[in-house]
Image (cartoon, helix red, strand yellow):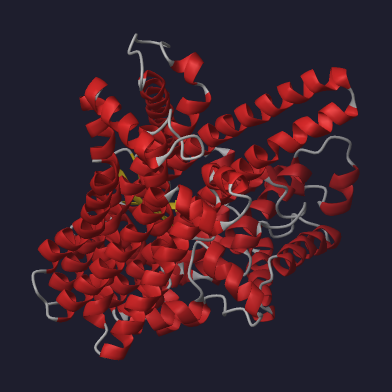
Amino acid sequence: MRKDAVALSLAKMRRESKLRTVLLVLVLCAIPTLLVGSAYAFELSDLLFPLGAPLGHVAHALLIYLGLLAALIIGSEHFAARTVGRPGEAPPVGATVSRIVYELSGRMGISVETQAFGGGEIEAVQAYRRRIVRIGVARLRESIFAPQDFRFVVAHELTHLASNDARTDRIVRSAYLAGALFLLAAFSRVLWAIGQGISVAWRFGIHAVLSSLADSWIALFTNSLSLGMLTLLFMLERRSAMRLREFHADAVASTLVGSASGIMEKLRPTNSRRFARFIARVLGTHPEREHRRAALEGLAAAFEADRILFLLQGYFAAMLLEILLQMLFVGASPSTSSLAERRTYLAQSISDHPVIVWCVIGTAAVMVGLSQVLVLRRIALVAAEVAALRLGVRLWAGSAIMVGAGAILSLLTSQTFYWEMSLARWNLLVWAKADPDRLSLYSIFWVGTVFSLALTLAGARRSTAPRELTALAAAVPVGLALMVGFGFYG
Amino acid sequence: MSGSTARSVFARSLLEEVAPVEIEFFEAYDATASDVFSRRHAGTGMGLPPEVSGVLGMVAVIVGRTVFDKLGEWAFSVGGEIVKKFLVDSGVERLKKWLKAPEKSGLAGVLTTEGYREVLAVVERDARAAKLKPEEIDKLLKSVAARLDS
């Protein structure tokens, strides 16, 4: 029974981890690529292949990103392989440790190597096809003096190996690094353009320089804000995913070897200061002790700690929607065209480049749908744990608010929004009147998400074919947004 | 027997006596101690790395290596001052023989009282720096003293 529970848990986590990784890598590919593609459109247009307009620069940016990502992943694997050395090079860990690792890894269905090393930790490393548990020499004796605690820690690390956490983290970390470099390149372009403006204005005196800066403030402010926000959210997401994996590893280890009370006592206690607790909660790679204890009692506590996912989902979905609108109406922005003109512009684009336009819309819809599926699956998992209706309603409301907050955050960090608001003299009603399509699309997407959350929760509580239901529920906000889009531009 | 092997034999004998339960981890401890010695100033230098503090078996191996190296320095020191202070007149050749095969000969009568005290002072200093408990420090000192007297 225990083995089945462990296998099921590992399989669920692997699926969720895979989905999250795919989504993250897609987002990390798409957003920085689009930003660099548009920032360096002239340089990238025919860089390698004569792809031409309208997406040649984006395609080249994507190729560069993928090349950079591959190089970082390969480099990272190589570095890990160098750290662990060749098989058999490391000193043996002794019969007791070998027996424990062999037994536990067998129960998880994986084959691992064991190494001793000079550190004070026990860690899981993946290097190419090898799975290695590294045990600090200072910890070896625990296998004799505190066997239950030792078994728990080893089972915890083996869970990371069985779930491919180390490799997943390597891929995501490489994608983040490549994305960060691209964001830096895009921001450098903005700074370069502002710098050029200042250098020209310099010849005409300080007033001209100040005037140039005044004209650039929106670009500088919004780019700083949006790139900074993106970086922050990516960092928070990664930290959150790492903490979630720790919860999962604790749960599997507890199922496999039993009580974790001894080892939990040895962890660093939860900080008494509220601010320090908050920082640990959002930035720490490992959850705090009290949280880990609570998560062992109930899965809901673990996922409760991962609410950042809903904020991120709202942010990413809104950002993708915004990028889509900017790409579709590159020559007809709301500040310079009426709704009727935008309608005509889109019809012309579809007529000239039907494949590209529909591919762009389709890709955005798929990516948003994927992010919805991830979030809804998470909701379904938590809902299955939550027995009381009151708690279910709280979960639904909390998730909906976080998604909405994420979408608003995306809007508030959008250069287009600030530009339009400045033209509308910072009057929200004037802006809404000039840009009803944008406002309606954001709103209907959020309403659709709220509905899909409710649908998923209701289905999970009734155990009604959750997988098919989450896929259907994920399609609701995307479908509604497409319908409203057709309504405005069709 | 090579110097490094002889050093390991001596360190192992200390581990066997002070922490016999940990003997199966000797190779890991020995390999780490080699790394520690090559990368840090362990023992009488800048102290032991924090991650191995308090681990009696590990400290025994590191102390064993330190003592062996210290005796080796004395045996091959040029100049004579150290030899007169820490080793008895006829002790140098016996010490060199011991350094080649510590399990085959003993150190009784090799060291002067000053030399004996110096070795134990090194052991105590390193054991305290490694944050061993007082009873563990005593155990280690007794074990080293027994080897110096055998």
* Residue A9 image position (x, y, % from top left): 21, 67
In the rendered structure, the answer to whether residue B30 lies left or right of residue A126 reads right
Outermost left residue: A465
In the image, B94 versus B23, the foreground residue is B23
Residue A334 visible in image: yes
In the rendered structure, the answer to whether residue A258 lies left or right of residue B69 reads left
Looking at the image, residue A248 lies above or below residue A480: below
In the rendered structure, the answer to whether residue A81 lies left or right of residue B150 reads left
Residue B103 visible in image: no
- Give the residue displayed 27% in from the left and 63% down from the top: A448
- Give the residue displayed 66% in from the left and 72% down from the top: B132
In the image, A340 versus A28, the foreground residue is A340
- Give the residue displayed 15% in from the left and 75% down from the top: A459
* Residue A399 image position (x, y, % from top left): 37, 71
Quadrant assignment, res B38: top right
* Residue A139 image position (x, y, % from top left): 48, 65
